[in-house]
Image (spheres, rainbow, N blue to C red):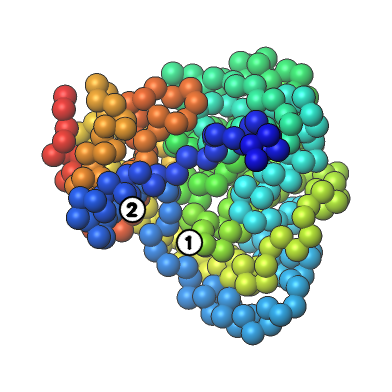
Amino acid sequence: MKHLIRKEFLEKGYVFATRAAETALASGHTRPARLASNENPYPPSPKAVKAAADVLPHTNRYPDETNKEFIDALKKRHGDYRFVASVGMDGIIDTVIRTLVADGDRVAVATPTYSYYGLAVQAQGGVTVSVPRKADFSVDPATFCRDAAGTKLAFLCTPNNPTGTTETPETIAEICENYEGVLFLDCAYIEFDGTDYRPLMRRYWNLIIGRTMSKAYSLAGLRVGYAFVPEWYGPVYQRAATPFTLNMVSQAAAAAALRDTVHVKKIVSVVQEWRQRFIDECPYPVVPGGANFVMVDVAPQKADDVVTELAKKGVIVRSCASFPGLPDHYIRVSIGEPWENEAFIAAITDIYQP
């Protein structure tokens, strides 16, 4: 009964890389290189796995609604900041929008970037205002603040998905000082870069820093997101949050993963090594970045065509054609296991057209 559905959800939604996977399978590749979803190819810390298994017998009860074990682990890892947690970064984004955005409110988004911001704003009845990045995909603070004027909330991703580009703390500070709304800084990939924005939380009332356990900590399947929030905002977030969003298995695994810093450092080191190899060995230009993926400019070819050709060779990557504001000659390639990375380098070299 389509007349009952809001028009925003009749056709469009989040775009997954399913078509490339189907092409790879149809081409006879039963174990393709999966480099489209920015996943961590390595399993979680054994300590996280054990912690999750230990609480499974107790899942007949609701989890701790305050997420105390996880929050305590966050404070031990990062310091005495105010934290909130939810089901993945998307859960944090949804709740933040719920607290600030009403029908017709405008929300600024630095584009091109992660498409879910716009989808979530739309779901809440808000209107997205696109703030274009510069030619090198960095953000100009003056332009950002000018275009975001009058909005209550703004989203800025760093390292940015899908470009991989990272903003300096000085850029973020300038925005916070001159923007009258709340800035949500999405740092899902920050462990792979190392830029530290946390000290800015002590200086600015209007900064929220979102993070996730899905990437560097290998817990994508458990959906754990968290955010540094200002003291004034913590109670507001909790009142708007869905009850019991983070299950006890996820909480236990995430807390244990945070404590295993050696495990994460090894993963980050491997990702950084392969990221540099992609930059050095890919025949197409690679945009310099700090995430666990790279964005490749395949011009004069089209992104969708290159994705299809790579899938036929058993390598699944992401076309960036669906990212608003980005030309259709970019692909995004995650860092995978060594054999997957080698497969990508070989396949992209084989189809290269100067």
Q: Residue at x 68, y 78 (%)?
A: 59
Q: Residue at x 64, y 37 (%)?
A: 2
Residue 307, given in percent of the width and then of the height, sits at 29, 38
Q: Residue at x 42, y 57 (%)?
A: 40
Q: Residue at x 75, y 78 (%)?
A: 61
5 to the left or right of 335: right
Badge 2 amino acid: Arg
Q: Is residue 201 above or below residue 323?
A: below
Which image quadrant for residue 331?
Answer: top left
Which image quadrant for residue 12?
Answer: top right
In which quadrant is the C terminus drawn?
A: top left
Q: Nearer the viewer, residue 350 or 258?
A: 350
Q: Is residue 179 above or below residue 259?
A: above
Q: Which residue is mark 1?
A: 218
Q: Nearer the viewer, residue 227 or 259?
A: 227
Q: Nearer the viewer, residue 42 or 269?
A: 42
- Disc 2 is placed on an element classified as strand
Which image quadrant for residue 119?
Answer: top right
Task: Give the number of the disc on residue 34.
Answer: 2
In which quadrant is the N terminus drawn?
A: top right
Q: Is residue 22 above or below residue 43?
A: above
256 to the left or right of 166: right
Q: Is residue 207 visible?
A: no
238 to the left or right of 36: right
Say few, some or many: other residues with alpha carbon within 10 Å of mark 2 (under 14 / 14 to 19 / 20 or more): many
Say few, some or many: other residues with alpha carbon within 10 Å of mark 1 (under 14 / 14 to 19 / 20 or more): many
- Spatial separation of the CA atoms under disc 2 and disc 1: 15 Å
Q: Residue furthest front?
A: 1
